[in-house]
Amino acid sequence: MRILCHAQHLTGVGHFVRMQAIARGLSGAHEVYLTSGGRSVPRPPGSTEPQLLPLPPLTRIGDDIVALESPASAGSVLEARARLLARAVERLRPDVILVDHYPFSKWELEPEVSAAVDAARRCQASVRILCSLRDVVRQSRHERVDNETYQATVLAALDARFDGLLVHADPAFTRLEEHFERSAALTIPVAYTGFVTALPHGEAAPLSTAYAVLSCGGGARHRAFLLAAMEAFRRLAAEGALGVSSLVVFPAAFADDTDLEVIESAARGGPFDVRRFGPEFERYLAGSTLSISRAGYNTCAALLAARVRAVLVPDPQMSDQSVRAKRLAALGIATRIDGDETNVSALMTAIRRAEAGPPPRHHLAIDGVARTRALVETVETWAR
């Protein structure tokens, strides 16, 4: 099969990381293409790789989408991307197109998604268009409409453009109808894949001593959280209350030099190892005995795969993280902090509780890459 995977990361890196894992899993048996139109994301090499389709890069600053590496307006870049993507589709004639998260969010990308879908249907009537969706979907602050309009817009786009919906979660953890109230009105079939994990469970850990990992995902506004967590760890280490030797700190993927300088300064003289976000992050997380982090999809999926004790501090600006952290805490898989993310005392309490507990156990499906591949390969039997 020839498959096109469309993903666009605008704030963090999660959307690209998840779709890249899926694209790599498909590449072992199929001809796979993956769009690349954001800031560069450092990733470990895979055993198989999709072919990248570069698009003029975009990012989000505040509430606005802006062009990277170009003085052009975001509007003109979006128009250029739509033309480039349509031409690529006409050349490739894909059998399946996977579109990450649109139309549940990223409405700014509607022109290029529509251009790609229209071009694909012109070239091959049998093409299947699938929406690729994370576990928790909520209207974000960027869809500036009332809830009724949001729900209607999503339904209309799914009906007009898509043939099926893949939810990358275990339905025992959460279901689409818990978050999208008009899911009963969907006219396309929905399939659950289990969680998508980027790193095979069991890969060797990079350190020989017991250690903890502190991370904040791909976002770039987490300095205060990281500093508070480091201070909590420093105090606990001074008390001799920890069973780990050090805290490996991973600032945000797109942290600027000022953020890095402040974090490195705070780490001096303490049991810290500050590293830039990079390809080795998942290996460090998988080999740790404790994780302190936000509650983004990819981090939580990696925690499920590695079964690492975890303290989750949801990013209050992200619509999905509080829901995910609450569910994981309710299942006894993680310790969750509510309220002030910079409360050192609360962080100390949560770290003590997580360290004292047993390694998490669960039966949630974490084979999302393999299950997605199976569903794509049988798409003609279940998609409309």
Image (tube, rainbow, N blue to C red):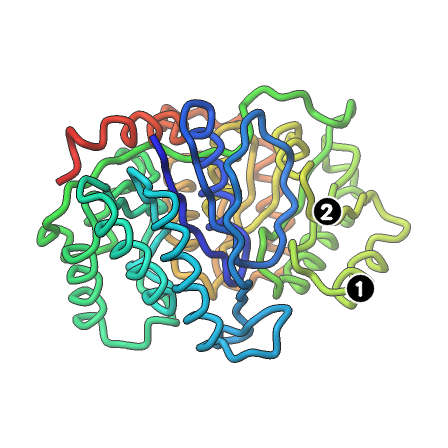
Q: Residues within 10 Å of mark 2 (few under 14, many from 20)?
A: many
* Residue in view at x 40 percent, y 64 percent: 83
Which image quarter: residue 150?
bottom left
Residue 117, placed above or below residue 378? below
Observer-nearest of 56 and 332: 56
Question: Can you identify the residue that label 2 sits on?
Answer: 249
- Residue 56 in the image: above or below residue 72: above
Amino acid carrying label 2: it is Val
Local packing at callout 1 (Cα closer than 10 Å; few below 14, some 14-19, many 20+) is: few
Mark 1 secondary-structure assignment: helix
Q: Residue at x 36, y 50 (%)?
A: 89
Q: Where residue 30 appears, x then y in whole percent? A: 40, 28
Image position of 360 with respect to 173: above or below = above
The quarter of the image holding the N terminus is: top left
Position in image of residue 200 (x %, y %): 54, 24
Measured from the top left, where is residue 113 in percent x and y? 33, 59
